[in-house]
Image: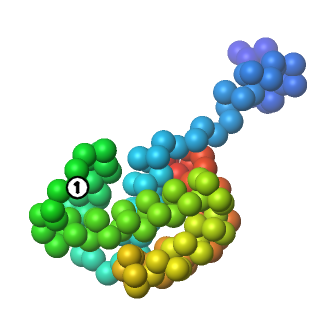
Amino acid sequence: MISSHDQFTSNSSHPASAKSADAPRALTREARLSWIGSKLAQLIDIEDARLDALHHRMWMRILQSGLEPAAPRNEIDQLAIHILAVATLADDVAAKDGSQAAMAAVMQASGKTLEPLLAEKFLHLASTPIFWRALRSDVAAA
């Protein structure tokens, strides 16, 4: 028998360090790129059977980011490169100058260094505050 309901309720006598352990953790850069890429991949017209291959190629490209870029292997790999170009630009600019600057950078690069359809899809995703909130925490990993 449970003697106290304190086990299941918040207790204000916990030290601050214990509370900070429960705070959302920031995602790694790789996880942020993967999350943005996955959200973009879900919005484009691609068959479910090819979606797994696309996610695999995006992760392979993310993991090889410090290496000299390899030429695209096929159409799926090329799509992964284009998606990650959007994700990388947005993540880099957002980390330095915030979400509004990231959206402006993607808009400006659309049709120049970024595929216009992917830039448009990203801008639709990024127009909600929940997108940026999720990106700054481990909520996106769930």
Total numbered circles = 1
Could you say whether the residue bearing mark 1 is in a helix, strand or loop?
A: loop
> In x, y percent, where is residue 111?
40, 85
Q: In the picture, residue 105 is in which quadrant?
A: bottom right
Quadrant location of the N terminus?
top right
Which residue position is annotated with label 1? 69
Q: With 50 as the anchor, is 89 left or right in this view?
A: right
Pinpoint residue 39: horizontal percent, then vertical percent: 44, 65
What amino acid type is highlighted by mark number 1? Pro
Q: Residue at x 73, y 17 (%)?
A: 2
Give the side of residue 116 with respect to residue 27, left or right. Answer: left
Q: Count residues near mark 1 (Cα–Cα under 10 Å), then give few for <14, some for 14-19, many for 20+.
A: few
Foreground residue, 112 or 72?
Answer: 112
Question: From where the camera sits, is residue 6 visible?
Answer: no
Tell me if 81 is positioned left or right of 123 in this view. left
Residue 132 appears at what percent x and percent y?
62, 60
Measuring 87% from the left and 19% from the top, which residue is drawn there?
13
Coordinates of residue 100 in the picture (x, y in percent)? 66, 69
In the image, residue 104 above or below residue 25? below
Please tell me whether residue 53 is drawn above or below residue 140 in the rendered image.
below
Image: 24 above or below 135: above
Say how the picture is coloured: rainbow
Q: Residue furthest right?
A: 12
